[in-house]
Amino acid sequence: MQVVDKKNLLIPEVGLRVKALESLLAEKGVIDPAALDLIVETFETQMGPKNGAKVVAKAWTDPDYKKWLLRDGTAAIGKLGYIGVQGENMVVVANTPDVHNVVVCTLCSCYPWPTLGLPPIWFKSAPYRSRVVIEPRAVLGEFGVAVSDETEVRVWDSTAELRYLVMPMRPAGTEGFTEEKLAELVTRDSMIGTGLAKSPG
Amino acid sequence: MNGIHDIGGHHGYGPVIVEANEPNFHEVWEGRMLSMMIGCFAAGVYNVDQFRHPIEKMDPRHYLLSSYYEKWLCTVEQNCIDTGIVTRDEVDARHKQLIEGKVT
């Protein structure tokens, strides 16, 4: 970019440059600042991994829903209302004792916004994107996830069109739990594959 | 296209750094940038591929050092220039006015 400061290689006063562009686009009628306020508020209040957790908890308690979710993630997630921008086409992959799934976007930052919200910085960072595809067990180990040698690790590379959600294994000792209670055990990282669902208690 | 963004399998970037209790936005401008990106997308300024293209053409040093939302600024600004909505001079001038406190 022309505006990059050659010394520090970053855009100086970047926040003010964002403001400059926003004010120009508003004056030209391309965007409406009030609509932008609403978008920010929606991300802060309505989007996030609690949506994906509801999907997983439902699949844990309803075998028919689980079958549907794994066969047609887009439709099954859409039934709960969590399909939209950056989550138009969804594939759900289930962890089992034999297979552990983990998701990355090596090229950028593709992530299922309607089910997980905005991606954390580490998901978008060079170390995660470069390493998880060549040494997934080492990366998982850094997240505290020990995968045994007998368990296959599958790494799914997202695209702009297709996003993945991991369905973690249901923790032991949760028999009879309600969907609501189960959803509390489903963490963001467990749906990326860099974590496991929490144990109760 | 291939380039610095095509980073899968590269060596040397070090450990994955995880921030505990990370907020959605670390600065107010990051939220504005996210919503402006969505607003321009909704207004038809670019499609997904057009959005990604300028990021993939960034100077590799800038790409690696810049934050996620700085990359988004680069591509939204470039797309707005390429489609004739604004000129670089206009953005430069408004940016300068804001830095100097001549407009708020």
Image: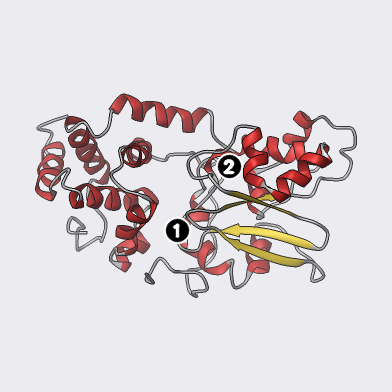
Between A72 and B17, the one nearer to me in the picture: A72
User: Is A61 situated above or below A147?
Assistant: above
Judged from the image, the secondary structure of the residue bearing numbered disc 2 is helix
Identified at 21% across, 31% down, the residue is: A29
Q: Position of residue A83 (x, y in %)?
A: 56, 38
Residue A148 in the figure: left or right of residue B57? right
Q: Please state, as top left, top right, bottom left or bottom right, where the N terminus of chain B lies in the image.
A: bottom left
Indicate the quadrant where residue B20 lies: top right
Outermost residue toward the top in this view: A34
User: Mark 2 belongs to which amino acid?
Assistant: Leu
Circles 2 and 1 on the same subunit: yes
| Quadrant where the C terminus of chain B is found in the figure | top left
How far from the left and from the top, in percent, is residue A188? 63, 44
Q: How many residues crowd mark 2 within 10 Å: few (<14), some (14–19), many (20+)?
A: many
Q: Is residue A148 visible?
A: yes
Count of labels in the image = 2
* Residue located at (33% from left, 59% from top): B53
Query: Which residue position is annotated with label 2?
Result: A116
Check the residue under mark 2 and report the chain it is in.
A
Of the numbered discs 2 and 1, the one sitting upstream in the chain is: 1
Q: Secondary structure at mark 1?
A: loop
Say which of B64 and B84 sits in front.
B84
For image coordinates 47% across by 39% down, the residue present is B24
Residue B45 at what x, y percent from top left? 28, 44
Determine if residue A200 is in view: no
Distance (Cα) linking label 2 and label 1 = 17 Å
**Chain for mark 1?**
A
Position of residue A110 relative to residue B93, above or below, is: below
Would you name the residue on which mark 1 appears?
Answer: A108
